[in-house]
C-alpha cells in the first residue's frame, strides 16, 4: 500500500472512531436528561461526575 493511501486509511479510521464516540455521547445524553432547574452542565464536570460513580 502506498504511504498516501495508508495516511488516508488512518484518517478515515480516526473519523469513524470520532463519529462512533459522538453518537454514543449524544445517545447517553438523551437517555439521562439533566433537569432544567440546574444550569447548563459543564462537560468536564460531567465527565468527572461519571468517573466518580
Image (cartoon, rainbow, N blue to C red):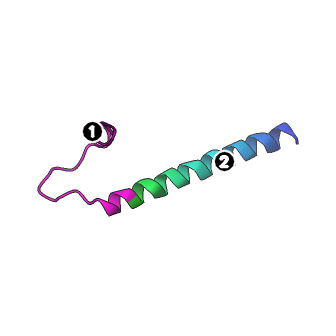
Q: Name the residue under label 1.
A: 45
Residue at (54% x, 49% y) in the render: 18
- Numbered label attached to residue 10: none
Residue 20, given in percent of the width and then of the height, sits at 54, 54
Look at the numbered discs 2 and 1 and tell me whether their residues touch, using CB distance below 8 Å: no
Disc 1, SS: helix
* Residue 5 location, quadrant: top right
Q: Does the magenta stretch include residue 39?
A: yes
* Magenta-drawn segment: 28-53
Question: Residue 21 appears at what percent x and percent y?
Answer: 50, 51
Quadrant position of residue 50: top left
- Tell me which numbered mark, 2 or 1, is placed earlier along the sequence: 2
Residue positioned 34% across, 57% down in the render: 29
Q: How crowded is mark 2: few (under 14 residues within 10 Å), some or many (20 or more)?
A: few
Rendered-image quadrant of the N terminus: top right
Give 52 or 19, whichever is nearer the viewer: 52
Amino acid at each position: 500500500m502506498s504511504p498516501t493511501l495508508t495516511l488516508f486509511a488512518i484518517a478515515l479510521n480516526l473519523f469513524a472512531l470520532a463519529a462512533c464516540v459522538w453518537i454514543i455521547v449524544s445517545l447517553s445524553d438523551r437517555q439521562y436528561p439533566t433537569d432544567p432547574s440546574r444550569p447548563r452542565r459543564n462537560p468536564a464536570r460531567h465527565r468527572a461526575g461519571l468517573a466518580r460513580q
